[in-house]
Amino acid sequence: MSIFDHLEELRQRIFVSVLAVGASILGCFAFSKELIMILEAPVKTQGVRFLQLAPGEFFFTTLKVSGYCGLLLGSPVILYEVIAFVLPGLTKSERRFLGPIVLGSSVLFYAGITFSYLVLTPAALNFFVTYAEGAVESLWSIDQYFEFVLVLMFSTGLSFQVPVIQFLLGQLGLVPGDQMLSIWRYVVVGAVVAAAIVTPSTDPLTQILLAAPLLGLYLGGAWMVKLTGR
């Protein structure tokens, strides 16, 4: 296949990916109010009221939520198109590990988002509401609230990719499993620092709740690399 054929195939796969994400965004926009109600659930029972502080703020918030959710729903298509494009150029041994890597990465990403929605987000928001209780009334900007929630969810999903990165480093022979396990003390500090950077909130509870699974994922990834003989 010539370089022009590769470029044409790449163009077609990019077009399909953009089309899938665009269709997902439109579908999410049609149900944007329902999505917003779902994302408001972590604080709805705590008496928090959401305000529109500027004309069109709620409209642009629905666009933002639809964009994030549409990208999330369209990501499997993007992943498939990327795999289909690079697969012919991989060796047999590389193809053998592609499936577990892709599957593991996808599962961990969605697990991170779920963990953030069910654990991290309620914990962080509860901290802020409880801290302000009796002093001020919780009237939050709808745009700033969703900026906080969406950034926290997606950054948590990305941070859950640690074992995938470890597996790749092990398969490439760059870092063996024994070495990964030997630096666990530094990893504890790194997990706390990473949690402080990833979480948009500054409360220690949220950072600890994220640092603990990050440390567990790292240790699990290190043992996986060791058991695979790398």
Image (cartoon, rainbow, N blue to C red):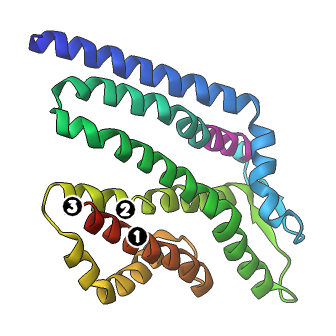
Please state which amino acid type lies under the numbered disc 2. Answer: Pro
Snapshot quadrant of residue 115: bottom right
Q: Which quarter of the figure has residue 103? A: top left
Considering only order in the chain, which callout, 1 or 3, is on the residue closer to the N terminus? 3
Please state, as top left, top right, bottom left or bottom right, where the N terminus lies in the image.
Answer: top left
Q: Is residue 147 above or below residue 200?
A: above
Residue 133 relative to residue 175: left or right: right
Name the residue at 40% across, 81% down: 193
Against 140, residue 98 (above or below) is: above
The range drawn in magenta is 58-66
Circle 3 residues within 10 Å: few <14, some 14–19, many ≥20: many
Kindly identify the residue that appears in the image at 75 percent across and 43 percent down.
35
- Residue to which mark 3 is pinned: 170
Give the alpha-carbon distance from disc 2 to disc 3, as whole Å.
Answer: 10 Å
- Mark 1 belongs to which amino acid? Gly
Q: What x and y, as percent, mark residue 9? A: 26, 14
